[in-house]
Structures are given as structure tokens and as C-alpha cells.
Amino acid sequence: MESNFPSDPCGYVLTFEDGFRIYFAGDTNVFVDMALIGELYEPDLAILPIGGFYTMGPREAAKACQLLGVSRVIPMHWGTFPALPGTPGDLLREIDRRGLATEVIELAPGQSWP
């Protein structure tokens, strides 16, 4: 992946009252410290970009799922314009290729989960 916008990775770990944790990656690529986020905060769900131009693509997002150790992922930043070719189906194929048991939750614009 090549980016026209060099920057430092920035994301958030959100912990809810019931203990459920979400890792929101923001506009990042995969980075090795995601393993630390997984180990220290144990997110239940990751929200990861998969567009593949300004952010990570499906291949990198699958690696991020592996590093984070998440059982579920919601892909974001994809399909809004031609420069973002990654799709949830591509992510699922990359997750399967790695032998991960991560569920891909595909949401339509405006749709909520669960």
C-alpha cells in the first residue's frame, strides 16, 4: 500500500459499561503495535479501514485482525469512490486465507450493529 499522506497511526479503544471493548483504527495501515493493543486491551471488535489507498487494504486488515486477536471486525472506508477498491468480501477471503475465525460484519451506510 502506498499513501500520499504520511502520518502516525491513531486509534481508540472504547470500553463500555458492560466491559465490551472496541478498537477503532481510524485512517491507519496495519502496524506491529496492534499486537500490544490486542494483548493489553483485548478488544472484542475492531473497526478497520479496508479501502486500500489512504488506509490499509483487505490484506493488511486481515493481518490487523490477527495481531489484535479480535473475533469480529467491521470494515470501514471502502466503496465510496473508485480509489478505494477493497471490499468486505476481499477481507473475508484474506481472513480465511490466514485461517482466522474472525467474523466480518458488513454494514450498509446508516445501518447499526447489533
Image: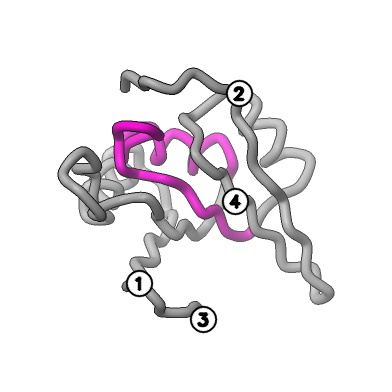
| Residue type at numbered disc 4 | Phe
Q: Residue at x 27, y 55 (%)?
A: 88
Q: Which mark is residue 109?
A: 1
Return the residue at label 4: 24
| Residue type at numbered disc 2 | Asp
Position above or below: 73 against 36: below
The first of marks 1 and 2 along the sequence is 2
Foreground: 27 or 35? 27
| Residue type at numbered disc 1 | Pro
Badge nearest the viewer, 2 or 3: 2
On the image, which quarter does residue 15 sit in?
bottom right
Q: Tag 3: Cα neighbours inside 10 Å, few (<14), some, or many (≥20)?
A: few
Q: Tag 1: Cα neighbours inside 10 Å, few (<14), some, or many (≥20)?
A: few
Residue 105 position, x and y percent, is: 39, 66
On the image, which quarter does residue 25 sit in?
top right
Q: Residue at x 40, y 79 (%)?
A: 111
User: Magenta segment range?
Assistant: 44-69
Position above or below: 48 against 35: below
Return the residue at label 2: 8
Q: Is residue 113 left or right of residue 35?
A: left
Between marks 4 and 1, how big is the CA–CA gap?
A: 17 Å
Position above or below: 43 against 29: below
The first of marks 4 and 3 along the sequence is 4
Foreground: 24 or 67? 24
